[in-house]
Amino acid sequence: VWIIFGIVDPRFFSFTNITGLLANVSGLMIITIGEILVLLTGGIDLSIGHVAAVSMIIAVSIAGQINDWVILLIITLSVGAVFGLINSFLIANIGIVSFICTLATGLIAKGMAFTITKGYALPIPENLISFGFEEWFRLPAIFVISILIVIIFEFLLSQTHWGRYVVLLGSNEKGLKFSGINHLFVKNTVYVISGLMSALGGFLISVNMGAALPGIGDNILLQCIGGAVLG
């Protein structure tokens, strides 16, 4: 696809356009990490897109006038963690099917996003908008952050016991349980991390776009599930 676009318009391969594309996929990369973890356990998280949207919307609506990105990030991650905890409790401890549970929590998040914003975009603080254009090593800063998080989770999955348990949970949950490993703890952590990654990805997407948008959840979901499956 890239080659075709490059042939149609050589400017597609310009440095400016490539860095713009990298910035656009940064948030999606992080959200996809959480979805990959859930898929590895044999489940699915359909709430990721709307959790990403509502997390930033709640943060901006609460602390939007406070020009402090740290407070906004903490609130955003907290909202994502709450949704992750709800999903993990209902799926791992109650036994609700992940498809049904996360579809429901995703719709709740979507309803909250549109109720708070009344369907309109919420502007984010100026210092966050400027950070969206910041560059590290001639690359978008938000893309560098995404790559670092990808590397961290690659290490966790391949080099730690927890990562091996995540893979084993999806392939042989009974075997993991009979081995004396707390399989419920592993499943809980996966859904909480998925909520956190959704919130962080939503934060970076909003920084890149300059606003918190209530209607981006469905597009995020399709792209991230597609990316997780293909990846």
Image: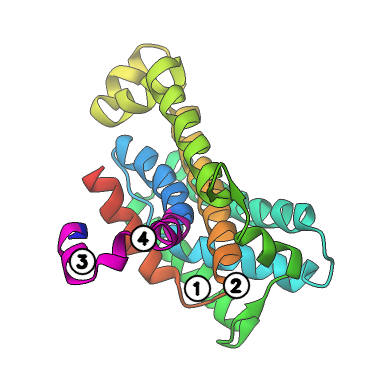
* Circle 2 or circle 3, nearest the eye: 3
Instruction: Examine the structure image and report whether residue 13 is included in the region drawn in magenta.
Output: yes
Pointer 3: what residue?
5
Q: CA distance from mark 1 to mark 4?
A: 37 Å
Residue 73 image-quadrant placement:
bottom right
Nearer-the-camera pick, 131 or 223: 131
Which sits earlier in the primary sequence, circle 1 or circle 3?
3
Q: CA distance from mark 1 to mark 3?
A: 34 Å
Under mark 4, the amino acid is Ser
Mark 4 touches mark 2? (CB < 8 Å): no
Which sits earlier in the primary sequence, circle 2 or circle 3?
3
Q: Is residue 45 above or below residue 179?
A: below
Pointer 2: what residue?
212
Residue count near mark 1 (Cα–Cα under 10 Å), binned few <14, some 14–19, many ≥20: many
Instruction: Examine the structure image and report whether residue 224 is included in the region drawn in magenta.
Output: no
Residue 136 as seen in the image, left or right of residue 7: right
Q: CA distance from mark 4 to mark 3?
A: 12 Å
Q: Is residue 162 above or below residue 198?
A: above
Residue count near mark 2 (Cα–Cα under 10 Å), binned few <14, some 14–19, many ≥20: many
Examine the residues drawn in magenta and state their main secondary structure: helix
Pointer 4: what residue?
14
Which sits earlier in the primary sequence, circle 4 or circle 3?
3
Pointer 1: what residue?
110
